[in-house]
Image (spheres, helix red, strand yellow):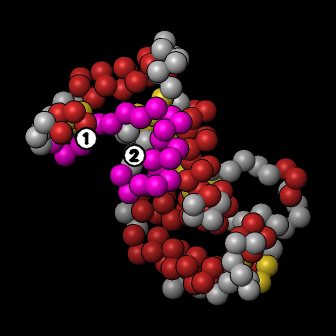
């Protein structure tokens, strides 16, 4: 799904939208059809959609299952990814990847959090889940599953970092180090 504000920013974001459709037509014509072509009975494995950014906020929160891949500009992407991260616990649990055909760079979606640096308060979940995504990318699915299972076990036990504690009634707050140690103990 191409997400843009091309309705008012015709040359920049409208250009992004146009480029997305051009790229799909030139490079992936055998696999991709537009949403309109799908409505007209087309049959290809990928449906290319486009959405106005502000409308997309509502759509992606109400129907996230309809949007497996979002291509957008940096600012729109920051807003939408943060809103989606909030739906699953916050930025502390949101892994990220920048990927091309040849390279993959995994990183937490949050910033450096300088206000809590050195205080043992950060949630390491985002970085740990980046590690799981890296393992999946390398084909090491069993190791990645072990990380996901450990994360599930620790959070289900309601022993969490401060950013999650306010969302989980009856939880026990631990620091970054203790949370990491609990994850390590729960690896299978």
Across and down, in percent, residue 33 comes to: 20, 35
Residue at 53% in and 30% down: 73
Q: Which residue lies furthest to the top in this view?
A: 11
Residue at 53% in and 74% down: 147
Placement of 65 over or under 103, stated as above or below: below
Answer yes or no: is residue 176 visible: no
| Res 38 quadrant in image | top left
Q: Is residue 61 magenta?
A: yes
Q: Is residue 82 left or right of residue 16?
A: right
Across and down, in percent, residue 115 comes to: 88, 53
Q: What stretch is highlighted in magenta?
A: 44-66
Sequence-first tag of 2 and 1? 1
Please tell me whether mark 2 sits on a helix, a strand or a loop: loop
Placement of 52 over or under 184, stated as above or below: above
**Mark 1, residues whose alpha carbon is within 10 Å: few (<14), some, or many (≥20)?**
some
Please tell me whether mark 1 sits on a helix, a strand or a loop: strand
Q: What number is the disc on residue 11?
A: none
Residue indicated by mark 2: 69
Across and down, in percent, residue 31 comes to: 19, 38
Q: In this view, does 132 lie to the left or right of 47?
A: right
Residue at 51% in and 85% down: 188
Q: Does the magenta stretch include residue 16?
A: no
Asked if the residue under mark 1 is in contact with the one under mark 2, i.e. CB atoms within 8 Å, the reply is no
3D distance between C-alphas at marks 2 and 1: 11 Å
Answer yes or no: is residue 17 visible: yes
Residue at 75% in and 72% down: 166
Query: Which quarter of the figure is the N terminus placed in?
Result: top left
Placement of 16 over or under 35, stated as above or below: above
Residue indicated by mark 1: 47
Q: Is residue 94 left or right of residue 44?
A: right
Across and down, in percent, residue 44 comes to: 15, 42
């Amino acid at each position: 799904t191409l997400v843009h504000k091309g309705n008012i920013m015709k040359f920049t974001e409208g250009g992004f939208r146009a480029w997305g459709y051009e790229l799909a037509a030139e490079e992936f014509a055998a696999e991709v059809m537009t949403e309109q072509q799908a409505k007209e009975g087309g049959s290809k494995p990928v449906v290319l959609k486009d959405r106005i950014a502000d409308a997309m906020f509502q759509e992606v929160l109400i129907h996230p299952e309809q949007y497996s891949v979002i291509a957008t500009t940096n600012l729109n992407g920051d807003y939408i990814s943060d809103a989606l991260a909030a739906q699953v616990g916050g930025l502390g649990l949101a892994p990220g990847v920048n990927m091309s055909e040849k390279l993959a760079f995994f990183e937490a979606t949050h910033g450096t959090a300088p206000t809590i640096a050195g205080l043992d308060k950060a949630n390491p979940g985002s970085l740990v889940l980046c590690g799981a995504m890296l393992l999946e990318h390398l084909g090491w699915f069993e190791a990645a599953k072990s990380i996901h299972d450990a994360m599930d076990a620790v959070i289900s036990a309601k022993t969490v970092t401060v950013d999650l504690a306010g969302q989980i009634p009856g939880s026990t707050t631990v620091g970054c180090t203790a949370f990491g140690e609990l994850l390590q103990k729960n690896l299978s």
